[in-house]
Amino acid sequence: MKGGQAFSNFVDLIITWWGSIQPPWRSFECKTMVCKIHGDWGALYTPHINSLLNVIMLIYWWIRILKDEPEDGSYADYEQFTSNVAWVFSHLTT
């Protein structure tokens, strides 16, 4: 996946997808998910193609790409994304 624009498009798609599976009350500010809880997490409790297991697999493949072919500044996007995912996971209840 070498090539700055291709990798940038990959990152944009990940962020857009992550936002699309969030509950409606979550919002973006400057391509960053706001970390404030204003409702329940029901939208994430669906066993379909956009399940949380896919998020874990995505994180795994993303770091593999970065380790094999690092791009300038690309770790910042990865760290921001994984930080947001970790925040969400830490607030999910059973």
Image (cartoon, grey):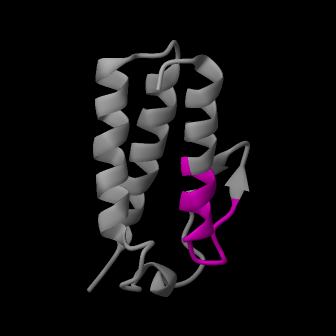
Q: Quadrant of the C terminus?
A: bottom left
Q: From the viewer's perspective, is 77 left or right of 66?
A: right
Given residues 15 and 29, the one toward you in this image is 15
Q: Which residue is drawn at 56% across and 71% down?
A: 22
Q: Which residue is drawn at 41% across and 45% down?
A: 83
Q: Which residue is drawn at 37% across and 38% down?
A: 62
Locate residue 58, reporting x and y percent.
37, 50
Locate residue 35, reporting x and y percent.
54, 58
Is residue 65 part of the magenta span, yes or no?
no
Locate residue 80, reporting x and y percent.
48, 38
Residue 70 sits in which quadrant?
top left
Vertical placement of 56 versus 75: above or below? Answer: below
Q: Which residue is the extreme one toward the top?
A: 72
Vertical placement of 69 versus 37: above or below? Answer: above
Residue 20 sits in which quadrant?
bottom right
Q: Residue at x 30, y 20 (%)?
A: 68
Given residues 48 and 30, the one toward you in this image is 48
Given residues 57 and 21, the one toward you in this image is 57
**Residue 90 seen anywhere in this rendered image of the structure:** no
Q: What stretch is highlighted in magenta?
A: 14-27
